[in-house]
Amino acid sequence: MKKILLQLLLCISFMGYSQDYTTYVNPFIGTTNYGATNPGAIAPRGMVSVVPFNTSGEGNTHEKDQNWVSFPYAYENKIFTGYSHVNLSGVGCPDLGAVILMPTTGELEIDPKKYGSLYSEEKAQAGLYSNHLDKYDVDTKVTATQRSGISKFSFPAGQANILMNLGQALTNESGGMIKVVNDQEIEGMRMVGSFCYNNPKTIYPVYFVMKVNQKAGNVGVWQQHRKIEGIEAQWMSAYNGQQRIIEDAYYPIIGDSLGAYFSYDFEQPTEVEVKIGISYVSIENARENLETEVANVSFDEIAQRSKNNWNDVLSKIDVKGGSDDDKTVFYTALYHSMIHPNVLSDVNGEYPAAKTRKTKITEGERYTVFSLWDTYRNLHQLMTLVYPEQQLNMVNTMLDIYDETGWLPKWELNSTETFTMVGDPAAIVISDTYMRGLDQFDQKKAFEAITKSAYPVDGGNPVRPCIDDYIKYGYIPVEDELDKKLWASVSTSLEYNIADWNIAQFAKKYGDEEKYKEFLARANGYKKLFDKETDFLRPRHKDGTWYSPFDPNDGANFEHNVGYVEGNAYQYNMMVQYDIPGLIKQFGGNKSFTKRLDEIFSTGQYDMANEPDIAYPYAYNYIKGQEYKTQEKVLELREKYFTNKPDGIAGNDDTGTMSSWVVFSMMGIYPDAPGTPQYAMTTPAFDEIKITLNDQFWNNKEVIIKKTGGDSNRIASIKIDGKTIKGYFIQHKDLVKAKEITFVMK
């Protein structure tokens, strides 16, 4: 009766949607061309993702130990070695990819290089993935809740094995513990961390509990023994430096390259379900997560629940018109934007505090994976507009991290600070959220936190290195970079400028006029880096002379160069989104500015795969008579780089940043200047877009964006509730109170 009631509730829930939005999600988009996404099963904002691990072993195009691979799955790879349960999506450095589950048949084999299998019949949709392991004739399906992964293996008759491999992972950390609890349960932990290798102390455990619905005939563990040299080695030939299998070991085993197995002898084909709960706090919490979310619930019911959850979040934006490929690009991008940041807290609210990892309890959801150098530019604006309750939890998480460490996060991962990339991005996210009117957080604490990072402190400022020179000179002199005190003097200066401008806006709204003037003046420091002879923002010495030799092409394609990180002088030329009018004056007027912007696009200097120039297509909106170029460039870039194919993202998705660019651009609005509560406007990709708003925050239930008139891509006029507006920008407050925004096309 309980099962029937659950199915009925699921059906009723799904009937509320005008369509099945998950049919337009293609999880294979971004799984090649270094998009670094994966087709694994995950719930919205899930801590757990069950991902086919295929970047280990000979015969693969991308092999994790042979070249720089930051992803557990690559579309072009062929060798499958299991399902990893903690993973990252769209990142550029390897980490996690751990707690790997693998089904095999025949004699027990524990070496992934030997038990790896070719696979076929691969399918993926939101919350569900499946394939067929050719070597073993085993069908596999996986799905997930927020904190648990569920696998279904269809074995043929005969000997079968289920392996839990803690030795294999994407992270290069090692060490762990594994224990067979009984013939249906395993528990343990695995060390992960050192993302991007910027902070080698950032290692930490991930805990798990695994339960199988079939009793095993044989159980055991394996361990890689360390290599012993010298006279003792004479008596250790049987296991010295070897992997050893210990049968019937119902006690904890600690070390490197650990694993455990359940073996079966099936008289007939048999389906086996495996459920794995994850926690970053404790084994007990991993068990509670598992029992709370998936106990006594079948695989099919969980898969349906996951589908319904995805429909719930995707349905917040409903589109009409456009091709099926357009809808697939759009909803897959929205799907990717809902993966990170993800939940870190367990079902009981516990989470590991930043820095100390002491167990704390959160009132709302505690989030993690803050790739803020990327996401401050658009993802958090998307969350603020469409999912404000999530964005508030993210801001509150940042403020909790400030309480726990004394600093706002920079690139936070599972309560560790990786210090990846440059700038002070949390200040931008918090200020932008505040400026858009989503201000239901501790504003006093927020203002204290964002200003603390902006000054020198005893012992050094970990968020803003060389902040003393930045304040002294108005920019970071190139000497600080040459002396290896920081990366990229120009890039870092510009990021500090953007953060300071955002702090100024927060201060003005908060009522601190003195701080407003101080930080506004600091934000104008970019003008000191503008070389009027070349019209570039370029490295500068302490004495005011320009660094030379200077070639604005240096640094393209992620090559190292002086002044810039992940870009060159062209790609940072106009990264002053908060003051494009002021930048135009530096260029000497609209004509020179437009000429350089045209040059960036026409000579291939624009890089769609990276963040510094991500807003450039919208810069034409600031030049009267040139706005049509925004419409042309956005369409051109969308159609070229974002497609319904595995290579359909220009490069790393950067935890949803590239995907958020597509979501906004296809809706015809883009938050081009973080901290300025506005959207630059361009031609929508669809005839109608309905954004369901949370009326608890925006006092409006929905806003509809329509495209009417001619069939060209050129905008003739834009109307808000029937009134034609001037220009190609709309304020956030006007967007969320509007009933209908109409793009009239030429």
Image (cartoon, helix red, strand yellow):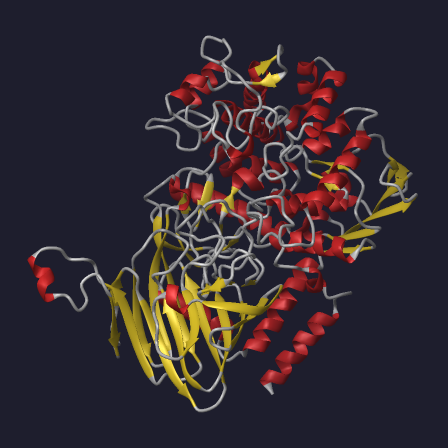
Residue 738 is situated, as x and y percent measured from the top left of the image, at 81, 45
Q: How many marks can you see?
A: 0
Q: Nearer the viewer, residue 204 or 407?
A: 204
Vertically, is 493 above or below 246? Answer: above
Give above or below for 392 relative to 478: below
Q: Is residue 636 visible?
A: yes
Q: Quadrant of residue 527?
A: top right
Q: Residue at x 69, y 71 (%)?
A: 13
Left or right, residue 306 beside residue 96: right
Q: Quadrant of residue 159?
A: bottom left
Given residues 420 and 653, the one toward you in this image is: 653
Q: Is residue 599 left or right of residue 720?
A: left
Residue extending farthest bottom:
267
Q: Position of residue 458 (x, y in %)?
A: 34, 26
Quadrant for the N terminus, please: bottom right
Residue 730: tell me if it is visible. no
Residue 249 relative to residue 458: left or right: left
* Rendering coords of residue 640 (x, y %): 71, 43
- How far from the left and from the top, in percent, is residue 76? 55, 56
Residue furthest out toward the left:
231
Identity of the residue drawn at 60% across and 52% down: 30
Tell me the quarter of the image containing the C terminus. top right
Please state which of residues 392 and 567 is positioned toward the viewer in this rendering: 567
Q: Observer-nearest residue: 486 or 134?
A: 134
